Image: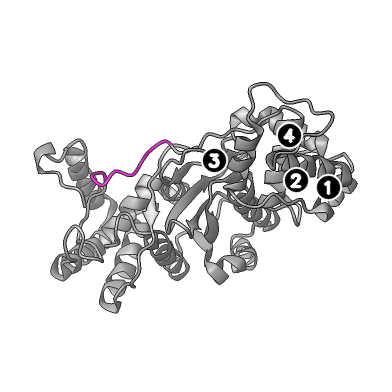
Amino acid sequence: MRNVADLPLHGGHVPPWLAQRMRKLTRLVLILAVEEYGTKGLLERLSDPVWFQAFNNVIGMDWDSSGSTTVTAGMIKDALWREELGVKAAGGKGKKSRATPEELKTIAEIYDLDPTPYVRTSRLVAKVDTVALQTGYQLYHHVFFLDEEGNWAVIQQGMNEAERMARRFHWFDAEVFTLDPHKGIAGLKREFALNTVSNEARKYQKTLLDIIQEKPVKIERELESLKAIARGYRPLVYYKPRDVDEKTLIQKYESLGKLELNRRALEFARELSVNNYEELLLLKGLGPSTLRALSLVLELVYDVHPSWKDPVTHPPDPFKFTYAVGGKDRVPFPVERGTYDELISFLEKLVEKNLQEKALVRNVTKITKNWKFPEEEKRAT
């Protein structure tokens, strides 16, 4: 996980005159990106939070708005379905995200792929970012990109309702979904996060798979004993892990939500003899509250710990993003319609050019690649 930015909830909507231009520009950028990097290269870039944010700024969205994800991803999805570039997208915001499995089946049929692994991947990445990694954000947006070669990327976003802040999760062709699997996470680094997919959580995952083979009633008794300890009671026999403040630890868990076990899910896991963490996460009924409860039991009864490090590494930087035509909310300056139309016209002509002419344009971009904006002229947006 390498690239991050936090996104506050913004109101308002994209006006029709701007949305029309955004759709045109999005299509042109995607065509040129696939020509230059191929479909896999496009997916790699969409899964890079900084590149995706730059794309968002180029079409005129705000750098720090939660809507930058939903609007930009929606524009990209629409363009990929209208233009045959060898890659398409499924899902979206709210109800549209629940249509992802069926849309993936349609895409797989178009590209002659087996949809089963991609439908499973879609479910699994959603479970990781709601259950296995808990930072107080509830997912409400999920877009799955799939190309004709079977490469995939996912962009999903969660909202912290209390703080009205969003966090964006980026995935690309992960082979292991349970050990530092993200390409990047866009969000402010929090004081702590329940992170059971960290490389540091290998022992935790193994022990958890052993514990769920116990009878659910035993795990429930242990959880209730721990809750009683938090209220000030002490059992007659209690082996306290060294250097652990039980009350503080339990409060940390409760700050993320309720501690409630789903007995049916635990019974199901036991019956199936689940033996890997991916299978456990995919179990119906295994939600955030159940994993929190299991984690607390592991920490205070078995002295085995998840990671509490928030896997964010790059805080938002208002100087990092450059606007080509302005911002929707007039930040850092109003969208300049004339400039926008000139840009669209230039790119439309570029798309029509032959390879030799396009190579000339690429050479121009190389010349300016290492140019840096003067420090004294920088101002935050």
Q: What residue range appears in magenta? A: 313-320
Where residue 302 sits: x, y (%)? Answer: 76, 29
Classify mark 1: helix, strand or loop: helix
Residue wearing tag 1: 269
Q: Which comes sooner in the sequence, label 3 or label 2?
A: 3
**Amino acid at dot 4:** Leu
Distance (Cα) linking label 4 and label 3: 16 Å
Number of other residues with Cα within 10 Å of mark 4, as a class: few under 14, some 14 to 19, many 20 or more: many
Front in this rendered view, residue 288 or 110: 288
Classify mark 3: helix, strand or loop: loop
Front in this rendered view, residue 148 or 64: 64
User: Is residue 2 shown above or below 354?
Assistant: above
Where residue 283 sits: x, y (%)? Answer: 76, 52
Q: Which comes sooner in the sequence, label 1 or label 4?
A: 1
Residue wearing tag 2: 280
Which residue is painted at 44% across and 71% down in the image? 82
**Amino acid at dot 2:** Leu
Distance (Cα) linking label 4 and label 2: 16 Å
| Total numbered circles | 4
